[in-house]
Image (spheres, rainbow, N blue to C red):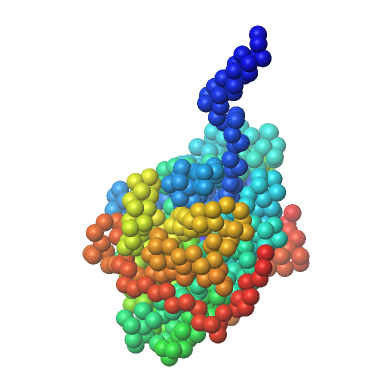
Amino acid sequence: MLYALMGLGLSLITGVLNIPNFAHGALFAVGAYLLVSTVNVIGNFWLALLIAPIGVAILGLVIEYAGIRRLYSAGHDYQLLFTFGLALILSEAIIIVWGPVGYSHLPPPILRGGLDLGFTFYPKYRLFVMVVAGLLVAATWLFLEKTRYGAIMRAGIENKEMVSLLGIDIHKLFTVAFALGAYLAGIAGALTAPIRGLSPQMGVDMLGIAFVVVALGGLGNLLGAIAAGLLIGVAQAVVAAYWTEASTAVIFAVMAVVLLVRPQGLFGIR
Amino acid sequence: MSNSKRRKILKLGAATAALGFPAIIRAQPKEIVMLGIWPATGAFADVGPILDRGMKMALDERNMRILGRPIRYIVRDSATQAGAATRRVEEAVDGEGAKFVIGPWSSGVALAVSEVAKRKKVFHIFSGGTEDISGARCHRYSFQWAASPYTAAKTVVDNFMKANPKAKRWHLLVADYAFGWSVEKYIKEVGKTHGLEFVGADRHPLGEREFSNYVQKAAANRPDAVAMINFGLDAVSGAREIFNFGLTPKVPLIMTWSSGVEELVQLAPEIRENIWVGSNFYYTADTPVAKEFVKSYQGKFGSPPGYAPSAAYSMTRLTLAAMEKSKTGEVQDVVKAMEGIEVNDLLGRMRVDPATHQTIRPYFFMRCKPKSAMKHPMDFADIIATGDAPLPKEYAACKDIGGF
């Protein structure tokens, strides 16, 4: 579900803004660090889980408004270089603010330990993450499908010129899409912190997987991102049960097989 | 001007020059170039800078001089890749005149660097978990500082079983490269003497961060103890996941070959509870050199040193001691001096086996403290035992160390 969350955010940005956001992994890491700092300040995990991703969304808003917006007319190379540079800057900023050494953050006491499900053991916190991430994916999907602004966003992915001609502020749409994508990366990072701990490079692995999800689902296809995220997660879990050593390689193997059969991805049309 | 007067003036001038400009008159002593091949990028990028610290500290103690000659310390990035590391070592040897190579940090990469040392006839010392440097692929130019995997396994298994005699069912999580295989082999060998049953042994790639699948399998096996044979962030990620699954603190976790401080600081005290740690160094080691080193390191960097900087520090000290013993600083003389050298140093009594180039030295076994027993944030564990049992002859794969 976390893969779906990350993939959905990245797909939204890729679809609406038509740029590959290499800073998506760094935003994921910022979400994790903000969660821990907020918990340290207010002492409440649940409140911190609400606040930290909003912080990342605001950061995304600033990035789009102050940086990416100025590069829409500059061409793809510049946008790509900008997000790549931004990823490096954010990683270094994490080291400056929080230090180079990684550390652990515990789940709230009520979610510590594992549950014996009869056929397997599973950590309570991971179950919680599955539920929350599932709800977030569903909420994002409903927002995009059932609200007027969601419809505008989907229209923006399909045809930006047409949306603009209809009198809709396309720049505002880009800003909101980037902030929403950043929010999804931020909350994925915040939810991940107690599972994987924190380190300045934590976003790098996740960025790779997020791009796999986006490519697998079809570039900019939101339903595809959700389906691909779930597919990758399930494939990884199934392979791990029988051949643990191949559980990471299977992510890329699935992508390679799908792209060989359907180069446009599962739900892609271009 | 008469001839005798002219000669007097020339003599006076020569004497003045000799007194005033001794460096011009005497030949400049030839510098000794030492290479630290440390990972600045790649899987162990976080360890490279602290390895560099340790080596620098040992060189600074000598004011960058040995046998009256200046030492030039150069560093290259091993990138934890055999190809990159060997290429950079060769360049440093050919281009910079490096004759003494210390590092790198990964066993697999070190084996490749060791081959370069053999071919280029330069001194090489390394610390890591592969048994091949002082085993099947031993040769005259490479030395191993870390305890033999057998010494580590024996210390860990014997002392853990002494404290937990009923914990007979073990599940192993093993890093899938030279170091993991070596330690796993001896854990299983020593385990036989205690009647251990290995209910599972999963191997994971270097750099693994998602351990839920491995831990799920471990939990399903319902072991009495889980033992990890991995290192660095792999070990930290594994320990965290084992806690998340609710295995620790109920089930003891053994970090067989840990960096100590650098890993333990990344785990919350709750996660560290009931973790047992084997390491090549722990900063509360009770030796005069360790105390002085730890004090100096803490003064400089604010935190106590773990295995990595201590290994770099001690390997450099050992190399310098061998250089001094050789009296020439020439590679082959230093190798001969190193063979059989015995010092009372960082870890206490340390001796280099001339037949295998393995350092015979204590290995540390610690138990992590519960949060309530910690006196300060860095008070992670108590050393409960040390062991220095050398590899028994029947396991020794280094049959002939060879010639130059």
Q: Where is residue B12 in the image (x, y as percent from the top left)?
A: 56, 19
Regarding residue A85, the answer to whether it shows in the image is yes
Furthest-bottom residue in view? B195
**Position of residue A140 in the picture relative to residue B223 (left or right):** right
Residue A146, image x, y percentages: 53, 54
- x 25%, y 62%: residue: B374
Quarter of image, res A96: top left
Total numbered labels placed on residues in the image = 0
In this rendering, the answer to whether B181 lies above or below A93 is below
Residue B79 seen anywhere in this rendered image of the structure: no
Image quadrant occupied by the C terminus of chain B: bottom right
Closer to us: B227 or A140: B227
Who is closer to the viewer here, B199 or A162? B199
Q: Quadrant of the N terminus of chain B?
A: top right
Foreground of the two, B52 or A167: B52
In the displayed structure image, the side of residue B368 where residue B258 appears, left or right? right
